[in-house]
Image (cartoon, coloured by chain):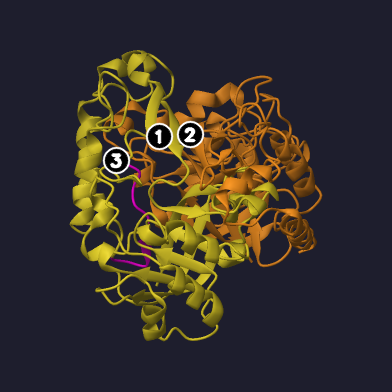
Chain colours: A yellow, B orange
Amino acid sequence: MAAAAALLLALLLAVASAPPLAAASSAGEAAAHPGYSADEGTCTVGAPAARRLELEGRGGTTGRIIDITHAYVPDLPAFAPGAATGPLVRLKASMEDGSEYNLSELRMECHMGTHVDAPGHINQAHFAAGLDVDTLDLHVLNGPALLVDVPRDTNITAEAMESLKIPKGVRRVLFRTLNTDRKLMWKKEGDMSYVGFTEDGAQWLVDNTDIKLIGVDYLSVAAFDHLISAHVVFFKNPDIIPVEGLKLDDVEAGIYMLHCLPLRLVGSEGSPVRCILIK
Amino acid sequence: MAAAAALLLALLLAVASAPPLAAASSAGEAAAHPGYSADEGTCTVGAPAARRLELEGRGGTTGRIIDITHAYVPDLPAFAPGAATGPLVRLKASMEDGSEYNLSELRMECHMGTHVDAPGHINQAHFAAGLDVDTLDLHVLNGPALLVDVPRDTNITAEAMESLKIPKGVRRVLFRTLNTDRKLMWKKEGDMSYVGFTEDGAQWLVDNTDIKLIGVDYLSVAAFDHLISAHVVFFKNPDIIPVEGLKLDDVEAGIYMLHCLPLRLVGSEGSPVRCILIK
């Protein structure tokens, strides 16, 4: 709420010094959006400040709704060693340049930041059968979920899975790992030393639990050395939904209502997603 | 569930005739995704069939979760006379071509299909103050909502608003109009004869109700003749969230839990969104 108050104050100050709100012709006198650089219209400047605020406890971790989605900013890590996401949003029409409205365009790979995989991502038969993100079951994406802490010295192996003693009947689990402690999603360089499921960990989950939604705290549900093999295990049947790149910092372990709503991207094997917990 | 069963059947047939799932080198023999054309990798073929299914009652209008989001397909209408959205998703890496995974890229204007506006869309002071979609209040975007039927012979004027007798304290209202009866969102040509809020209707809402989330069933909350003026009224204060292009076909009027989750697009004045109702 302090952040909201600060925003409101900033807004009041901006309004006090700005030209009349509805006058498109004079809007050019207002300052450029802090999220855009002046030359290219790409999102570069405001993002780091917003992310710093969030690291310090903005982002809704107090109160009833907890946002477990990373903001889409250019310095999100991408899935390659040292790679950043880069600009995703570009201002196509600008009131500052005389337009009656501001209008941005979005351009991104569908597996950037917090996102879901559809079965067709690593399984061509499922892809050919049209099992895209629009076919993902909303009754899996929405419902009670368990947030657990994985032992910090291991990938999510069969042994680690067994040690978590997740009860039968639990359908949605968010796995918090060393990735969160290392703040890997807050570093702009992709880091392939993240932890994730090994092939035997994936097989153990499929064989011994009722889990259908698997939330993880870095860009892949599978550890890098098991990247294809663990995905293949999960996608053998098309009923498991990996949700990757979640922001699980500063959330207590426990049971929440989870709402994950991907875009209805017909034909796509992945989608950016917004995920929240409600306590 | 009939659609799910049909999908499962199609999948079983595909698996029975497909090469081994994990063998990237032989994946090239599997059929192309029906949502993509062979030449450009753009989404063109599967989409109309999916939309027809949905018109006939797929899309989750039975059961506990009701999807009120339009699928993103190339033949969604765009906001200009006769304009269609066009391809949004493009396959960048393909298992059929020997990649170990399928990977799509998304490119779209942020006000296509079902989407939210942030205050900076039509208000430069708010834009300059950084009031992007990432600042929209999750406590407004999630909560109880009332779905009402607007008289079918009018824009959403002050008189129409008054006639709806929406009780004080109601914070989220989805306005179903003639647009739904005319199936405007299901036609690929943008149609500027849609109905929406007039300036006096917008002012009446601000002055006489507690509504903070305004859902409408075409691409703009404002009628075309009041496009800027009605937006200006709504965005005078930055606390109202328009949700546009909702799919309200075949949903009973009444009270639901609404979950609208836009992407966290830092710097953008709009975002595609997934919205669901839970009965």
Q: Secondary structure at mark 3?
A: loop
Looking at the rendered structure, the kind of residue marked 2 is Cys
Q: Earlier in the sequence, mark 2 or mark 1?
A: 2
Residue at 53%, 85% (x, y): give it.
A168
Crowding near the residue tagged with mark 1, few <14, some 14–19, many ≥20 C-alpha atoms within 10 Å: many
Residue A97 position in % (x across, y down): 35, 14
**The disc numbered 2 marks a residue on which chain?**
B
Residue at 52%, 46% (x, y): give it.
B273
In front of the other: label 2 or label 1? Answer: 2
Q: Which residue is mark 3?
A: A84
Residue B112 position in % (x across, y down): 56, 33
Looking at the rendered structure, the kind of residue marked 1 is Glu
Q: Nearer the viewer, residue A123 or A166?
A: A123
Rendering quarter of residue A162: bottom left
**Are discs 2 and 1 less than 8 Å apart at CB?**
yes
Does residue B104 show up magenta in the picture? no
Which quarter of the figure is the C terminus of chain B placed in? bottom right
**Which label number is shown at residue B110?**
2
Q: Can you say whether A279 is above or below A4 in the image?
A: below
Main secondary structure along the magenta-highlighted residues = loop
Instruction: Please report the bounds of the magenta region as a residue range.
Output: A62-75
Q: Nearer the viewer, residue A182 or A232?
A: A232
Q: Can you say whether A93 is above or below A178 in the image?
A: above
**Dots 3 and 1 on the same chain:** no
Looking at the rendered structure, the kind of residue marked 3 is Ala
**The disc numbered 3 marks a residue on which chain?**
A
Does residue A63 show up magenta in the picture? yes
**Which label number is shown at residue B269?**
1
Residue at 69%, 20% (x, y): give it.
B82
